[in-house]
Amino acid sequence: MWSYIVRKLVYNVPVYLGIILLTMAALRVRDPVAGYLGKNATQEQIDRLTQDMGLDRPFYEQYGKFLWQIVRLDFSEESWAQRGRTVKQILIDAIPPSMSITVPSVVASAFIALVVSLISAYFRGRLIDRTLVFFAVLGMSISYLVYIIFGQFFGAFLPLHQQWEFTPFAIQGYEAWTSWSHLSVLGLNIPYPNGIKFENWIEYCMLPVIIGVIVAMGYDTRFYRAVMVEESNKDYIVTAMAKGASKPKIMFVHMLKNAMIPIITRIMATLPFLITGSILLEMYFNIPGMGRELITALIANDFPVIQAFVSVLALLFILSIILTDVLYALVDPRVRLS
Amino acid sequence: MSVQRMLSLAAVIGTMLAAVTFAWGQEKILRVPMATEGPKTLDPVQGSTTYENRCCSQFYQTLLQYKYLKRPLELEPLLLAEMPQISDDGRLWRFRLKEGIMFHDDPCFEGGKGRELKASDVIYSWKRLADPAYRYKNWWLLDGQIVGFNEYKDKQAKRVDAGEPFDYEAEVPGLRVLSDYEFEVELTEPVQQFAWKLAMFQLAVVPREAVETYGTKFSGHPVGTGPFILASESDWKRGTSILFTRNPNYWDDRYPTEWMPEDEQYGFHKPAGQRIPFVDKVQVTFFVQSQPQWLEFQARNLDISTVPDFAFEQMFSRRTKELKRSEARKGLVHFKVPLLDFIFRGFNMEDPLLGGYTPEKKALRQAISLAIDWDEMNDAYYWGTCVVYDGPIPPGLDGFPQTEGHRAPVSYRGPDYERARQKLIEAGYEIGPDGKVVGLPPIEFYTSRGAVSEKMVALLERNLDEVGIKLNPHFVDFSELIEAVNNKKAPFFSFAWGSDYPDAENNLALFYSPNVSPGSNHFNYFRPEYDELYRKIRTMPPGPERTAIYEKMRDMIIEDAPYAGSLARTRYYLNWEWVKNFKPTETFYNYFKYIDLDVNHEERPK
C-alpha cells in the first residue's frame, strides 16, 4: 500500500506543478499591484511594490521561488491587505472556525443521510420512501440563502426578539469554543484543542451546522438511496435472500458494505471543504473562517493570500483523492492498490 | 407614622437605592455595527478606507477636527491649542500644540506610562508617509505640498534601496520644530485646502517608541492620544469585532458648545461643556451581510444601524421618506445623512469617437447626457432618496446648485429626448426612419460587475435607445475597470467619487489636467482656462469670490460634458432612543467620544 501511495504522490507532482503554474499565471494576467493599490496609486508606488514583491522578476524565477516556499511549507510572506500578519497566521487563525462548522456538518449529514437512505431503500416504493424522497427533493430545491435567512430569523432572532426563555443561538458571530495549543511540525505550528467551552459552540456554531446539515441532506439522501437501490438489484442480494437472510441483515450488513465505495467517494470529495469552509455560512454568520478569508482576500486583491490559499487547496484535493483510493482498498477487498 | 407606612417607605427607598447602585455599577457599552469585514490595519499611515478611519480615529488624533454639531462642516483645533497661524503669503503655517496631552500608557514607554505629546511627534508621524516601508499608501496627501519633502522622500528611497535604514532624523527644510509645543510648516504654494488634510486620520500623531517597539505588529497595537484604547490585542478579533475601552488618562476634552438650532429637538446641546468620553466601551461588530446586522439591531443587540435597502420600505414611507409612525413608536430615532457623492458616467476625452472639444464632439456627449434619466435611476434603485444634481460638486459644498431641481445655469441633464436628438443632429448625425442614429457605432461602456449594475445598465440602454443610440456594455471586475480607465481604454464608464474633505476643490481637481489618467482625472479632461482657475482657487480663502469661481468652473465642465450626471446618495441612520448625542456623519468618525447612553432605559436590554 505504501508503495502505491508513494507512486501516486509522485504521479501527482506534475499535476500539482501544473496547477500552481496555471494559478500563478492567472493571477498575473492583470497587474495585481495596480489592483491592490487602488485609485490613488502613482506609477512610482506601483513600481516599488512590484519590485519589493519580486513581481518584476522573470516568471520562471517567481515560479521556482514559490515552489520552493511550498516545499518548505513556508507561508511567512506578509499579507498585502493585513499588514503585520503573515499568510501562515491568517490560514492558521481561520482554520478552527471553519472546521467548527464543516466537520460536524459533514459527519452529521453523512450519518443521517445514510440512515434515511437505508430506510428509504428498505421501504422502496412505499409511502414512507416516497415521503422521504419528496422531502429530499424539496430540500435540494430550496436555495441555501433561504435556509440561512429563515434560520437566522426563526432560529435566533425571533426567540431573542420575543424574549423567550429558550434563546440558544446567536444571530451571528463567533467565539472560540476551544483553547488551542500548537504543535510544531516542519516549521508549521499545527493547532490542536486542549480545552472546550461547549456552550460557545452551541451558541455560535450549532445553527450554521443545522443549516449545513439540512442543505446537504437532500443531495446526500437522494444519492445514497440511488446507490442502495442499485445494489439491491445485484445478484448477491438475490442469493442472500434465497439463503433466507433477513431483510435488515441484507441491507445493513451485505448491502451497506458493498455500497461504501460511492459513499466514500462522495464523502472524500467534501474533505478539502472541511478546511476551506462554507463561504455562505461564514459570510452570513460572521464566522472568521477560511471561506470568508478567501473572499476578503479576493476583494482586497491580497495576492500572497490568494496564491497560498489556492496552492493549499490544490494540495488538499490531491491528497484527498489518494486517500480515497486507499480507503477503497480498505473497505472492499476486491480493490487492489497496484 | 405607622409601621406599615415606614416599611413601605423603606421599600421605596431601598428600591431606588438598588436602582441607583445598579446603574452606577453598569458599564456603558455602546454597540455599533460596521458594514464590512473590518479594518485591515490600525496604523493611520497604512490605512485608507472609511473602516480604518472609523477605528483609527478612536485611538489616534489629528491636529484639527470637525466641529461635531456644526453644518456646513467647519474645522476646530484638536491637538492644537489654537487654529494654525498662517503668514500673509499663505505659505508659512505655524502650529502650537496643547500642553499636557499624554499618549496611552503602554510598555513601549519608560515605566509603561504614556509620555507627553511633543511637536517632534507630529513631524515624525508625517515623515512616515515618505517611508517606503509603508508603500507610500498616503503619500498623495502631502505630495508636493511641503518645501523639501519630496526631495527628502526621494533621498530616503535611494538610501533604503542601497540597504541603509530610513533616516527619520534627516531634516526637511519645510518642517521645522520650534519648541516642544511649536512647529512650522512651509508650503510650496499657499494651498488653503491643507487645513482639511490636517483633520484626516492618515496624518494622526503616533509615538516613535511604539512604532519601533512593535515593528510590523504596530498595525494591530495602537498607541495614540485618543479617547479610547485597545485594552488587549485580542480585543480586535479580525473579521469579527473590535472593542474600544475608554482611555483612563484621556486629556481634558469637552463636549462642543456650538450647535445648530435643529439639534435642540434631539437634546444634542444638553451636555455642552461636559468632559468626554461618556461611554466606557464601544463594541463594534463587523457585518459582511446586512441581514444579520439588521436582525441584531431589531433584537436591540445594536444601538445604532444604517438602514439596508431591503428594509427601507418596512421602516420608511416611500412618499415622505420619513420614519413610519408605527416604527417611531418602538423608540426609534432616524437621521438622514447626505453623502459627499459624485456618481456619474464618464467619457474619455481622448477617445476618437466620444472625446474631443469641437462643437460636434461636445454635442454628441451632451446628447448622451440629455438621454440619461437620473431621476428614474434614483427612484428605481435608491427609493428616490438620492439627490440628483448638475455639476461635479455634491450637496452641502460651495458651488452646489441651490436652485430648484439643483439645476445649474447650463444644464444637459436628462431626460430630454427631443433636445438630445437635436444635439445629435448638431453633432453631424442623422436620425434614420427607424429612429436609430445613422453612422454612430455602439458606445463601448465599461462598468463593474454585479446584479444591480446589470439592472442599471439595462436602464441606461433603454434611455439611450430612446434617441437611437446603441450601447455595448462591458461588465468587468472593479480592478479591471480601474485598469481600463487608467489606461484610457474605456470610452464611456461608470464611476463614483467620494470627497476626501468637504471642499469642492477636491471634486474640481478631478478635471485638472496634471491629474490625467492614471491620476484622478479619469476623463483626461484638458482645458487651459480651467487649469488656470483651478490653480487660483487652491490659494483662495473661502468666500463669495471663490464660490463664484467654483460655479464658473462647474459650468465650464457641464458645457464640455466630460461626464453625464450627477447623483449623491443619502444614508439613513436609525438609533434606539436610549442613545444620546448621536448626530451621524460620514465625513469624520471620531464621534464615539460624544455619544452617551441611558443605561436605565426600560427598553434597553440589560
Image: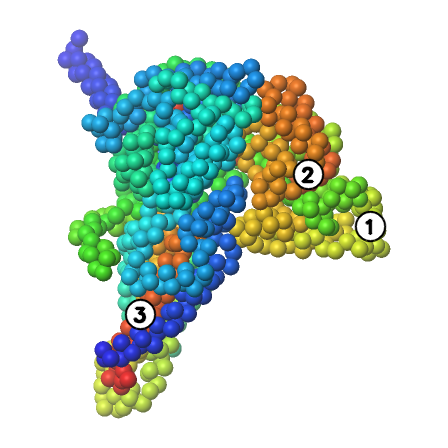
Quarter of the picture containing the C terminus of chain A is bottom left
Co-location on one chain, circles 2 and 1: yes
Q: Which mark is residue B380?
A: none
- What is the chain identity of the residue bearing mark 2? B
Q: Label 3 crowding class (10 Å Cα cut-off): few <14, some 14-19, many 20+? A: some
Which residue is nearer to you in this view: B431 or B25?
A: B431
The residue pinned by badge 2 equals: B526
The amino acid marked with disc number 2 is Phe
Q: In the image, is A230 to the left or to the right of B248?
A: right
> Where in the figure is residue B598, as x and y percent of width and height?
34, 24
Q: Nearer the viewer, mark 2 or mark 1?
A: 2
**Mark 1 = which residue?**
B429
Badge 2 crowding class, 10 Å Cα cut-off, few under 14, some 14 to 19, many 20 or more, is many
Q: Chain of mark 1?
A: B
Q: Is residue A295 visible?
A: no
Helix, strand or loop at label 2? It is loop
In the rendered image, the quadrant that contains the N terminus of chain A is: bottom left
Q: Give the residue at x 20% y 49%.
A: A179
Q: Is residue B80 left or right of residue B419?
A: left
Name the residue rendered at 38%, 77% in the picture: A226
Distance between the Cα atoms at labels 2 and 1? 25 Å
Q: Nearer the viewer, residue B154 or B248?
A: B154
Q: Which mark identifies residue A319?
A: 3
Q: How is the image coloured?
A: rainbow
Q: Amino acid at mark 1?
A: Tyr
- Quadrant of res B5: top left
